[in-house]
């Protein structure tokens, strides 16, 4: 395991990117990447909720998000680190693997990208996408309390960020494994949470549809819970798992 990176402008970020170099260009990559991710999953989710008979089901939605993230990590990972998620960005900053001065640029870019994606989804699906599917706004299922929804979103984001930080910052992990691992982790997390919370796993993914549709009822939950889970995952990996080594015969 390489030594923990610092907070300077030349700190190595996710997937070998350089955190802080050409910050505006990196921010642009985060905006575009988040736009594609939220558009891919959100548009499929709206299609699932507005066609009769349904064209898509939960599997299609999960695959849209997971495959989009897989492709984006491969395409943009070396450019910006392909965070595409404020929970990832803040988790990395807390563990000193990303400079704090770059956090506002990344988070704003991610939120703007999500809003633009939701506007594009509205344009594709016109009024019915907003009226029936709320542009894929994530909301707790009927009967699910805010506390339970908070726990679920924090839990699944913990899983996602743990995988992201493991495969993208640890030199022992083959670089080629990262895109598939991260995309698969997102898919699994959405499978787990979709019946309960809709499976946002990402404050930006929740923010865009909620703002554009005007449905802000549970937005606070989807902004806060993933950050709690993501920061906890980053700390657990950095302090507990990263220094670990599997036992070898020489240890006898």
Image: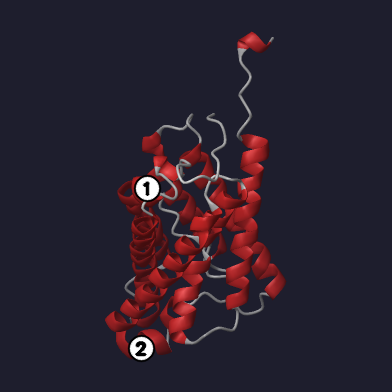
Q: Quadrant of the N terminus?
A: top right
Residue 70 in view (yes/no)? no
Q: Quick one: label 1 or label 2, which is nearer the N terminus? A: 1
Return the x and y of residue 118 as percentages of the image width and height. Answer: 38, 77
> Does residue 213 appear to the left or right of 90 in the view shown?
left
Frontmost residue, 93 versus 216: 93
Q: How many marks?
A: 2
For the residue pair 86 and 191, the one nearer the viewer reads as: 86
Rendered location of residue 5, percent (x, y): 54, 38
Residue 77's label in the rendered image is: 1
Give the structural element (helix, strand or loop) at label 2: helix
Q: At 57% across and 77% down in the image, what residue appears? A: 219
Residue 152 is situated, as x and y percent measured from the top left of the image, at: 63, 63
Q: Quadrant of the C terminus?
A: top right
| Residue at (40, 65) in percent of width and height | 61
Closest to the camera, between mark 1 and mark 2, is 1
Res. 115 image quadrant: bottom left
Residue at the disc numbered 2: 128
- Asked which colour scheme the image uses, the reply is secondary structure
Is residue 88 or residue 162 the one in the foreground? 88
Inspect this view and state whether residue 120 appears. yes
């Amino acid at each position: 395991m390489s030594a923990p990176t610092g907070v300077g402008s030349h700190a190595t970020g996710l997937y070998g990117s350089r955190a802080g170099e050409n910050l505006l260009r990196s921010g642009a990559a985060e905006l575009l990447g988040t736009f594609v991710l939220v558009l891919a999953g959100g548009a499929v989710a709206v299609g699932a909720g507005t066609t009769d008979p349904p064209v898509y089901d939960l599997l299609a939605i999960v695959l849209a998000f997971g495959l989009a993230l897989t492709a984006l990590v491969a395409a943009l990972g070396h450019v910006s680190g392909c965070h595409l998620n404020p929970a990832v960005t803040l988790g990395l900053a807390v563990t000193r693997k990303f400079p704090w001065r770059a956090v506002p640029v990344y988070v704003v870019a991610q939120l703007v990208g999500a809003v633009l994606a939701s506007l594009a989804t509205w344009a594709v699906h016109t009024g019915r996408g907003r009226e029936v599917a709320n542009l894929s706004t994530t909301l707790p299922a009927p009967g699910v309390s805010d506390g339970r929804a908070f726990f679920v979103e924090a839990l699944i984001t913990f899983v996602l960020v743990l995988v992201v930080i493991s495969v993208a910052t640890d030199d022992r992990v083959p670089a080629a494994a990262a895109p598939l691992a991260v995309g698969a982790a997102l898919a699994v997390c959405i499978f787990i949470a979709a019946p309960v919370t809709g499976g946002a796993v990402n404050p930006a993914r929740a923010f865009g549809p909620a703002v554009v549709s005007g449905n802000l009822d549970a937005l606070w939950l989807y902004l806060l819970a993933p950050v709690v889970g993501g920061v906890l995952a980053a700390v657990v990996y950095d302090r507990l798992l990263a220094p670990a080594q599997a036992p070898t015969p020489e240890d006898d």
